[in-house]
Image (cartoon, rainbow, N blue to C red):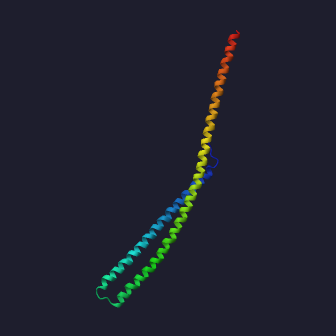
Amino acid sequence: MFQFRLQPVLDYRKALEDKLMLEFADVKRRLDGERETLERMRCEVADLVSQLKARGERRLSAPDVSFYLSYINYLRGEEKRQAEIVSRVGEELEEKRTELVEAAGKRKILEVIKEKQLKDYRITLTRREQKEMDEASILRSVGGMKREEADTCL
């Protein structure tokens, strides 16, 4: 029966890779959410600017214009902060991707070693079986000769 000596290490590496896949997926979901938030902010700023332009065709009071401009500036500041968050989460995602690729490579190396050892085991087993069959054939033929010699002596 074939037993891979490094099976516990392979199992550990598979578990580590699975854990990293989950972490990668979590960071990816978080990045997608942060990007959606950024896009909503950009749309809101664009909507406010278009509303201000539309209202600009009519006469607006200075406080109304000031309110719009203040809120637009505030949202642009928030948009910059959100863009920084998206950038940081994107970097974190790349780090997780690198870790995941590295873990997958280490697991793959062990799987290649396991496959090679399994192949060698099968070859050795086949040779052993062939040797046993050859020996059995020789013993049968030698046993048959001894009977023939005994028959001729009588």
Q: Extreme bottom residue here?
A: 62
Q: Extreme top residue here?
A: 154
- Residue at (65%, 22%) from the top-left corner? 140
Q: How many marks?
A: 0
Q: Which quarter shows the C terminus? A: top right
Q: Which quarter shows the N terminus? A: top right
Q: Is residue 142 left or right of residue 33?
A: right
Percent across and percent down for residue 10 are 60, 52
| Above or below, 9 relative to 32 | above
Percent across and percent down for residue 65 are 36, 87
Q: Quadrant of residue 75?
A: bottom left
Q: Is residue 1 visible?
A: no
- Residue at (62%, 41%) from the top-left corner? 120
| Above or below, 11 relative to 143 | below
Q: Quadrant of residue 58?
A: bottom left
- Residue at (57%, 54%) from the top-left corner? 14
Q: Is residue 122 visible?
A: yes
Q: Quadrant of residue 70?
A: bottom left
- Compare residues 35 and 22 and report the one nearer the observer: 35
Q: Extreme right residue here?
A: 153
| Above or below, 28 relative to 140 | below
Percent across and percent down for residue 45 are 39, 78
Percent across and percent down for residue 77 are 45, 80
| Above or below, 28 relative to 123 | below
